[in-house]
Amino acid sequence: MTRTLLALLLAIVIGGTWAWFERPDLVAAAARHLPDSLRQQVEARLPKPAAQGSEQKQASGSQQAGGQPRRNAVAVALAPAESRDFVISRRSIGTIEPVAMVTVRSRIDSQLVAQHVTDGQMVKAGDMLFTLDDRELAATVAQNEATLARDEAVQERTEADLKRKRDLLSTNAGSQQQVDQAFSDAKSAAAAVAGTKASLELNRVKLGYTKIKAPIDGRIGTVMVTPGNLVRAGDTGTGLVTITQVKPVRVTFTLPERELAGLRQAMADGKPPMVHVRPNGQEKAVASAPVSFIDSTVDTQSGTITVRAEFPNADLTLWPGQYVDVQVDLRTRPDTVTVPTVAVQTGQDSPYVFVAKPDGTAELRKITVLAAQDGRTAIADGLSAGENVVVDGQLRLSNGTPIRTGKEQAPKPVAQNTEARS
């Protein structure tokens, strides 16, 4: 029973060898270990040695004469290594933040009598938001205006008395004491006028507080207080409403401390790195802007530096509080050899690629990877521009394996961004 199972297993292996490699010589060698009945059946199906030799000779001659691939060569797809300017980028996760956000509160104690905005409404600075009851303050202002008129009349009378007393003193018809008294009365009247004016101005300012207007451009949040409710100046709660500026907005993210020197140098040269943001679910960046701010300190716990960029956000694509994928173009490396990322294989000691040699074989070439981005990998060493690398069929290759190619192709780019450091 055991011998039968082993024979069946060996027959399966032989069949797989024939189907995979199309090598009758390997099949014949393996068949020698089968029982006589199975070995005879296998050998009966193999081509005759003369025919096999003739066929191989014909295939070899065809390859030499017409340039056709050898029958036992592995089918692969190739793509050329290209020299181009390669952008060195880093990726991070960022948060969209408003440049300004204001919680609107009442500055006086009063009753809210009118609401002029709705939830989610866009407003401009100066737009009316709420109206408070202003009757008491309006009456106080009117009272101050009347008092001011009285004080100004008194001031005019005292100034006239002072002038008359001085004229009498000049003709020796009056005394110096009378002049001093008139002068004092005039100064008192002038002070009363100044005090009344200050009270009037203060109450006019308070009266203006009954008209609550938008301090910034932005979007109205949820209105927290409706008409009829009392509002207080010292309220520290949620306020009347919150206005969030959505144009422009900024993205805040972090980068490793090792990138700080390059960021500072770029900012000093007047060429800040470009920042591209991509919301979750988007394949392409929806906004780009230069770095506008680098934090003054490095976070000692995480070893990162906080960076910001500001976007106009005219179409409101970005929303405050939103998480986004951030790509920062740190620098551009000119004349860099690049290959499709799928061509790069991971070895035990270093990455490698299979290079198509002119003699129709594949060469295993160790390389030094600089970075990978958007389906392309930058090669720092080990490969030259113009060489063809294998992008499909690497699993069946080893160093020196014969290969045959169809139409050269490049794989579809894969959205990724990684870095390699030696």
Image (cartoon, rainbow, N blue to C red):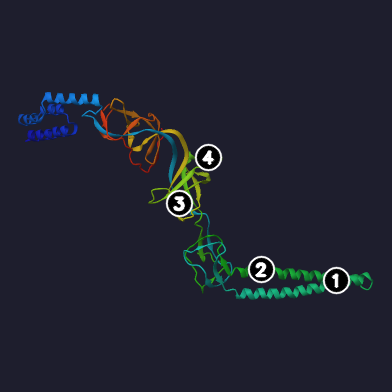
User: How far separated are the C-alphas under marks 3 and 2?
Assistant: 43 Å
- Provide the secondary structure element on which disc 2 rests: helix
The kind of residue on which mark 3 rests is Thr
Q: Are marks 1 and 4 in contact (CB under 8 Å)?
A: no
User: How far separated are the C-alphas under marks 3 and 4?
Assistant: 23 Å
On screen, residue 365 above or below 373: above
Query: Does the image show residue 233?
Result: no
The kind of residue on which mark 4 rests is Ala
Name the residue beneath numbered marker 3: 95
User: How far separated are the C-alphas under marks 1 and 3?
Assistant: 72 Å
Toward the viewer: 384 or 36?
384
For label 2, the crowd category at 10 Å Cα-Cα, with few meaning under 14, some 14 to 19 and many 20 or more, is some
Residue at the image point whose x is 64% and y is 76% from the top: 139
Name the residue beneath numbered marker 4: 266
Residue located farthest toward the right when viewing the structure as drawn: 172
Q: Are marks 3 and 2 in contact (CB under 8 Å)?
A: no
Tell me which numbered mark, 3 or 4, is placed earlier along the sequence: 3
Residue at the image point whose x is 9% and y is 31% from the top: 45
- The reply, left or right, for residue 63 in relation to residue 155 is left
Please give the count of numbered marks on the rendered protein: 4
Name the residue beneath numbered marker 1: 162
Q: Position of residue 246 (x, y in %)?
A: 49, 57
- The reply, left or right, for residue 268 in relation to residue 282 is right
Q: Are marks 1 and 2 in contact (CB under 8 Å)?
A: no
The kind of residue on which mark 2 rests is Leu
Q: Position of residue 47 (x, y in %)?
A: 11, 28
Name the residue beneath numbered marker 2: 202
Q: Position of residue 77 (x, y in %)?
A: 29, 35
Name the mark nearer the viewer: 3 or 4: 4
Tell me which numbered mark, 2 or 4, is placed earlier along the sequence: 2
Q: Place residue 196 in its image quadrant.
A: bottom right
Toward the viewer: 152 or 248?
248
